[in-house]
Image (cartoon, rainbow, N blue to C red):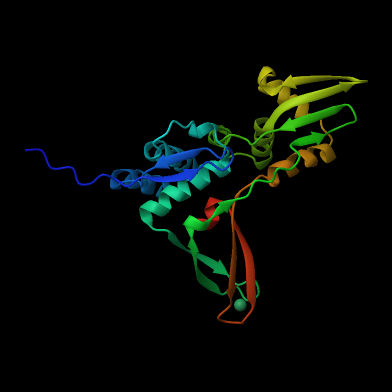
Amino acid sequence: MALPKLNTAPIYEMSVPSTGERVSYRPYLVKEEKVLMMAFESGDQKQALKAIVATIEACVQDKLKVQDLATFDVEYLFTQIRSKSAGEKATVLLKCEECETQHEYEVDLSEIKVELNEDDRVVDLTDQITIEMKYPPYKAIMESDLQGDQMELGLDMVVASISGIIVKNGLEEERMDANDVSKKELMEFIESMTSEQFERVTKYIGDLPAMKHEAKFKCLNCGHYNNMELKGISDFLS
Ligand SMILES: [Zn+2]
């Protein structure tokens, strides 16, 4: 006789932050948790990124191209799935800014938000040349060399964040789509920037939306009132 089915997992809903699309999802199960744990404990960052994508693909009931989503989307979706699977409260260790005493701080993962800054997605490089930016897709990080040089990684992210290049010629304006330009050409274009122009581009990447939470606590040792910002998945799931 076959064993009976244990349960039908409950279904929840959430929004994809960058698009607002509503998706339904179920919590992850023991078999999926096992794969996740092994990936996290391996210390191999790529394996962890892959396991996160696989978990979202398994738990979200709607069609979603997870690797094409923005990093903050993937981190948010995963955190919400995890909160319904392993508990909505996560305990993180935070150090007092004054005396460095460690405190256990509890975050309610279901309350975490991603705020989109609808800021200019356009960076002017010269009077004639402007670049249009987009959220770099998660796969750009998955495909990059995470152990490698930080500078290379930064350049890869910039390439992945450019959606178009606009050239003004008098009153005429011509737009080139980044998809129609080879990665090599884009890289050469970026490498020909002055460091000041490059900084304007990397600022866009530094200011990308992220999961954020303001953690406020009074230090039990020195009484200092701490007010710090948790940002990105690593700050929440430590
Ligand atoms: Zn303190």
Instruction: Identify the residue at horizontal 39%, vertical 42% (top origin).
Output: 25
Instruction: Give the side of residue 70 with respect to residue 6, left or right.
Output: right
Counting the numbered discs, the total is 0
Image location (x, y in percent) of residue 119:
74, 43
On screen, residue 173 versus residue 11, left or right, reads right
Q: Residue at x 42, y 34 (%)?
A: 62
- Residue sitting at 49 percent across and 34 percent down? 66
Q: Residue furthest right?
A: 170
Q: From this viewpoint, which residue is outermost toward the left?
A: 1
Q: Position of residue 46 (x, y in %)?
A: 49, 39
Up the image or down, 159 lies above or below 176; here it is below
Q: Quadrant of residue 24 in the image?
A: top left
Percent of width and height locating residue 97:
64, 71
Of the 4 image quadrants, the one containing the N terminus is: top left
Kindly tell me whether residue 219 is visible in this rendering. yes
- The image quadrant of residue 101 is bottom right
Q: Report whether 35 appears left or right of 117.
A: left
Asked whether the viewer can see residue 44, the reply is: no
Q: Quadrant of ligand 1?
A: bottom right
